Amino acid sequence: MALEFRSQMDDAWYDARIVMDGYDCLRVKFIGFPDDHDEVFDANNLTSFKDIAEFRRRFRPVSVQVQDNECSQVAKGTLVCVAHAVCPDDRRFYDAVVYKVLHEEHRFVKGEEECPCSFILFWRHGPKAGCLTVQDLENICRVQPRRSKMNPLLTSFLETAREKIEITLSKICATPHEPAYDEKACRPSVSQRLKQDTSTSRRPSSLISSLKRFVQIALKTFSKCISFLIFYSFLKPEMNGNPSQRAGHVREIEGTPHMIIVDNLERGL
Ligand SMILES: [Zn+2]
């Protein structure tokens, strides 16, 4: 089955056929050219679905030469494949879009219709890419719509490439995440940070800790003794006097009323 293939060498379209070259490779053979012009593609080099799609777009049905009596089929906006003369005996085909058609009356020579119309084309790729040129109908081919059913060999090759990509992706997904650095060492967990806080930065040495504890106990005991003595000195006179004054812990000192607040007094005392 003949196909049209856009070469990777010069980006031009050529009539070609394809054959498998081993299990993973597809060989494109250019019709009318010797074997040393073949282009070989390895499925392993198509490493993404985008690569597959782009490679798929390099193939399409063979474009058809527009006949003179089919001139009306080439209208503004039509995608065409046009011959570009690289040299007098070397014509290569690239895609262009019809920008404008300058119609002229067709004539008949020996019973055959001739199209003298001129076609202004906008080249999409190739040496004239982005340029407008005027072409005759004889240089213009009509691009055929792509068929949903592709060449079976091309379908098989693309499927092989797709399976390889899916296998690679499945391996990547199945591989446990390996951080590029030791996250535990760099970012300790909350419990680790708390442990570090209490075990290192906030904990004094054992000697300091014992001394501090001793001072705390001594201060607490001293405070209790002082509180008890103050409380006792103020209550003692009232124990033998008016009970109502004892209950309020209020007594008058040199004519000024004072309230004594006793703290750190244990219940037993
Ligand atoms: Zn015409």
Image: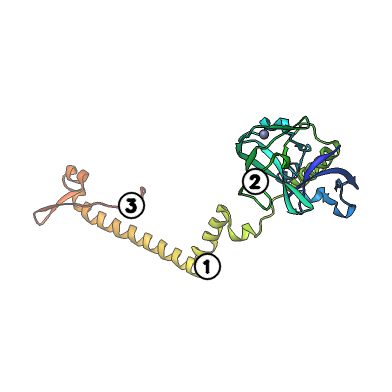
Instruction: Indicate which disc residue 265 carries.
Output: 3
**Residue 150 placed where, x, y %?**
80, 35
The three-letter amino acid code for the residue at tag 3 is Leu
Considering only vertical position in the picture, is 157 above or below 229? above
Task: For marks 1 and 3, give the CA distance.
Answer: 31 Å
Q: Are marks 1 and 3 in contact (CB under 8 Å)?
A: no
Mark 1 or 3, nearer chain start: 1
The three-letter amino acid code for the residue at tag 1 is Ser
The three-letter amino acid code for the residue at tag 2 is Arg
Considering only vertical position in the picture, is 196 above or below 8? below
Instruction: Classify the position of the N terminus by image quarter.
Output: top right
Disc 2 is placed on an element classified as loop
Pick the residue in front: 119 or 185.
119
Q: Are marks 2 and 3 in contact (CB under 8 Å)?
A: no
The residue at which mark 1 appears reads as 206
Considering only vertical position in the picture, is 87 above or below 109? below
Task: For marks 2 and 3, give the CA distance.
Answer: 98 Å
Q: Residues within 10 Å of mark 3 (few under 14, many from 20)?
A: some
Please indicate whether residue 251 sits to the left or right of residue 156 in the image.
left
The residue at which mark 2 appears reads as 124
